[in-house]
Amino acid sequence: MFRASQFEKIRTVAVILISLLLTFLIIAIISKDPVGTIMIFLFEPINSVAHIGNVIEMSIPLMFTGLSVVLLFRTNLFNLGAEGLFYFSGIVASTIAIHATLSSWLHPGVAIFAGAVTGALLSAIPGYFKAKWNVNELVSSLMFNSILFGVGLYLLNYKLRDTQAFINASYKFQKTALLDNIIPGTRIHTGLILALLCIFAVHYYMYKTKWGYELRMTGSNRAFAEYSGINTTKVIITVHLIAGFLAGMGGSVEVLGMYSRFQWTSLPGYGMDGALVALLAKNNPLSVIGASLFLAYIRIGADLMARMSDVPSEMISIVQAVIILLISAEQFLKFWKTRMLLKEAGIRD
Amino acid sequence: MESTPLLEMRNITKVYPNGVVANSNVNFSLDEGEIHAIVGENGAGKSTLMKMIFGMEEPSEGEMLLAGQKVRFMSPQDAIDNGIGMVHQHFMLVPSFTVVQNIILGMEPTKGININYKEAVRLTEELSKKYNLAIDPLAKVEELSVGMKQKVEILKVLIRGAKILILDEPTAVLTPQETEELFRELKALKREGHTIVFISHKLKEVKEICDRITIMRAGKTEGVHETALVSEQEISRLMVGRDVVLKYDKGTREPGAAVLRVDNLSYKNEDGKPLLRNIGFTIREGEIVGIAGVEGNGQAELVNALTGNLPDAQGTVAVGEHTILGHSIKQIRDVGVSYIPEDRMRQGVAKDASISDNLMSMFYRMKAWNKGLTLNKKKIIQFSEEQIERYKVRCKGPAQPIGMLSGGNMQKVVVARECEADPKLLIAEQPTRGVDIGAAQLIHQRLLEMREDGCAILLLSADLNEILEVSDSLLVMYNGQFVAYYPDVRQVTEEDLGFAMLGLNVQSEAEVRRAIHV
C-alpha cells in the first residue's frame, strides 16, 4: 500500500505520466499517423547506440546545471543564474582552449577549472548581496544572466571570433583541449564521468558532512539556523560559490566535449533547464541523474520525431510547461494525500 | 424532545496537509444564550475546531448545522454573514489606526464617497454603552493596553452583528484584574442574548463563568458537562486522562556563584522609545529566576539582548568571565548559554527536517560528532533515540520530520536539545506555552533537575502558576524596567503579582536592586 510519506515521489510519477498522456493527445490531434509518431517519440531514442548516445550527451550539461540549482533551491535560494554562468564560463574555457598551449592531459583540465572558478566567483556576487543585504536573488541572478550574456557576446565578437569561419564562431579549439570520447559510436565524452563524480560529491557533502547540515538547516528555516549559531551569511555565500563552480564547470565541459569552436550566439537554455531538473529531482542530488536523463530523453524523442514525422519538436515545450505547472502546484493530488493520511491515522478503513 | 441547538458540528474530522490529524470525529453543540467552554490541552484540537466554525479552515469530513440548517463556510466572511464572530488570541488590529477606524474597517458607513466618521463614532459609542465596554473611540490602538485592545476586538465582532462570539484564550494576556472585567462584560453579553464560546485551559475561569463545558483530548471530544456538576479535578482528569499535580517538591538549594550578571542594560528602538531601562540582576548557580510581566513590557527585548539578537543594547551582560553583549550567537552559545525560544515554529525547529537534524544543532560541530569530514551517523542516531526515550517524544523514529509532531512533542525536542548541551545558563522563554499538561510537567521536572545540577535558569512565562511553582525568586517587569523583586517566591500571591504587573504596586529602586547578588 502507498503511504503518505511517499506522496511526493508518487506525485512526480503521476505528473510525468499525465504530461506523457498529453503529449500523445497533442500528437494524435496534429499528426496524420499518430501511432507511428508516438512510437518514434517513445522508442526511437533507444533504438540505436547513436540515439542512446544523443540522450546521454544531452543529459551531461543538464546534470551540471541541475545539480547547481539543487544546491541553491535546497538552501531556499531561488537563484536562476546558472544560465549566464554556463554561457560565460564556456567563453572562459574556450579562450584557454584556443590560446593556451598545454599537454592533452592538462589542457582540458585547466580550461574546465578556469571556467568553474569563474562561475564560482561570478555567482558569489549575487550570493554576497543576498547574504549581506537580503537582495532578492531571483532578480539579481536574472539581471546577471543578461549582463554575462552581453559581456560574453562582446568577447566572442571582438576577441575570439574567427573571421574565416562561415558562422559567428570563435577560432578552433586546439586538439589538446578537447575532451576524449569514451564510448565509440557516440559522442559521449569524459564529461559524463566528471558529472557523476560531482553528483556523488554533492550528495556526500549535503547529507554526510556538517557543512551540508548547515546548508540544509539554513534552507529549511534560516531563523532556526541562526538561532543555532550557524553563520548563515557564510552558508549562503558558500552555496553560491559551489553552485557557480558547478554551473561553470558544466558550461566548460559542454563546450569542450561537444564543439570544436565556441558558437553560442544566444543563451543555450541549460541553466533554466537546470531549474526544471531540480524540480523533477525534488532537490535531491542523486535524483538529478534520473531527472536529467528523462528530460534529455523526451527532448531527443521530440527532435527525432520532428525529423521523422510531421510533428514539430516545439511540441515538447508544452509538455515541459505542464510538468512545471503540475509539480509546482501544491494542491495537485492533495485530496489523495489527505485520504492516505486519514487511512494511516485509522480514521477510515 | 430537546430544542434544536443553535450550532452543531457532527462527526468533524480535520487533517492538515502536513499529516497532523487535528480533529477526528468531533461532535460539538452549542445552545442559544449560553457561555460554553471548550477546554483541553494544547494540541487537543480546540483551535482547529474553532477555525472551522469561523470558516478559516474547512473540515475534511463531517457536517455543520446552524439552527438546524446545514451550512458550509468557505471563508470567515461566510461565518460573519451568519452571525459568528471570533476574537483571536493574537489581536487582528491595525496599530496606527484609531479605535473607530479599526472597528469599521471593511464595513465603513459612507456619505457619498467619503467615510462618515461621525456616524461611525456614534455607532461605536452606542455599542460600547449598550454592552458596557467603555472605550475612547478616537484613541489610537497602539496606545491602548492589552485589555483595551481586546475590548476593541469584541466591539469589532459585535458591530458586524455577531450572535455567536468565539473567544480564543481571551485571558492568556490579561492580568487578574483585567480578567475580572472581561468576565463582567461577557456576562452582560450573555444577558443580551449572545452565545459565547470560551476557549481556555484555565479551569478556574471556566468554572467561574461557563454554563457548559466540552472537553477535548487528542483531537476527540471527551464529553459535554454542566459546569456546576463537575469539579476542577474532574475536568483536568478528563483533559489529560490522569490526575494533575501542579505542585513540585523542589527542596531547598543554596545558590552558588553568580553565572549571569546583567547591569545597567538599556535599549531604545529606532523611534527612540526606551524599551529596556537600566535592567540589573544576577542569576546564580542552581537558581531559577522568574520574570513575570504582561507581554510587551520589555521581556522580549531582554531575552534578545541575552541571546545575541539585540546588538544595539547598552550596558553589561556577562556569563561567568565572558561579556556577551554584542557577540555573535555562536560565541554566546559557546560560553554555555542555551535558549528555549518562545516561538518554536519560527526559531525553535526546522519543521521539514528530521527529529535528529533538529536535535543535533547544538552538537554537530563537536569533535566527537564528526569522523574526519563525515558526521558520525551512529552517534546521531544513538543520541536521538536516547532523547526520544528520555523525553517521551511521541514519534515514529528519529528520521521523522519534526513538523509532523504535535506542539508538545516538538517542544520536548527543543527542550531536549537545549538541556542536553549541559549549559551554564538556560534561558527558558515560555517553555510550556501551547504544550499539554503532561509535557509541561516533564519540562518543569527537567528544569528542576538542571537546577539541582547547578545550572542558572532564567524563566519567562505568562503563566503565573508556572512561574510561581518553578522559580526560586521572581522579578516583575513593567514598561521596560523591573518594578518588583521577590527573593522568595513562596511569599508572593497571584494578587500581589497582578498589581505589580500592572505597574500599580511598584517597589523602590533599592528594593529592586537586591536582585543583584555579588
Image (cartoon, coloured by chain):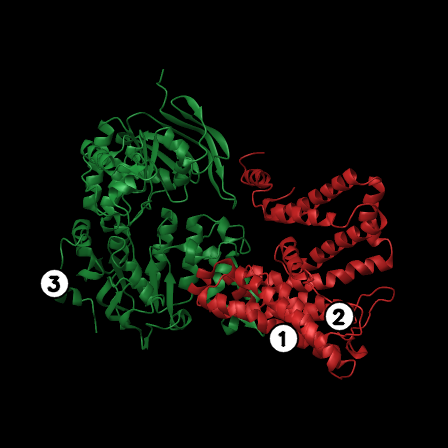
Q: Chain of mark 2?
A: A
Q: Chain of mark 1?
A: A
Q: Within 10 Å of the Cα at label 3, are there few (<14), some (14-19), or many (20+) other Cα atoms?
A: few
> Which residue corresponds to mark 1?
A117
> Which residue corresponds to mark 3?
B508
Please state, as top left, top right, bottom left or bottom right, where the C terminus of chain B lies in the image: bottom left
Identify the secondary structure beneath mark 3: loop
Residue at figure coordinates x 37%, y 32% from the top left:
B80
Q: Is residue B211 left or right of residue A151?
A: left
Q: Residue B350: where, in percent of width, then height?
A: 48, 57
- Whether labels 1 and 2 belong to a single chain: the reply is yes
Task: Please tell me the numbered disc located at residue A169.
Answer: 2
Identify the secondary structure beneath mark 2: loop
- Residue type at mark 2 is Ala
Q: Residue A349: where, in percent of width, then height?
A: 58, 34
- Residue type at mark 3 is Ser
**Residue furthest to the top:** B1
Residue nearest the observer in this picture, B474 or B17: B17
Residue at figure coordinates x 35%, y 61% from the top left:
B449
Residue nearest the observer in this picture, A348 or A192: A192
Residue B218 vertical placement versus A279 (above, below): above
Residue B223 vertical placement versus A121 (above, below): above
Q: CA distance from mark 1 to mark 3?
A: 65 Å
Q: Within 10 Å of the Cα at label 1, are there few (<14), some (14-19), or many (20+) other Cα atoms?
A: many
Q: CA distance from mark 1 to mark 2?
A: 24 Å
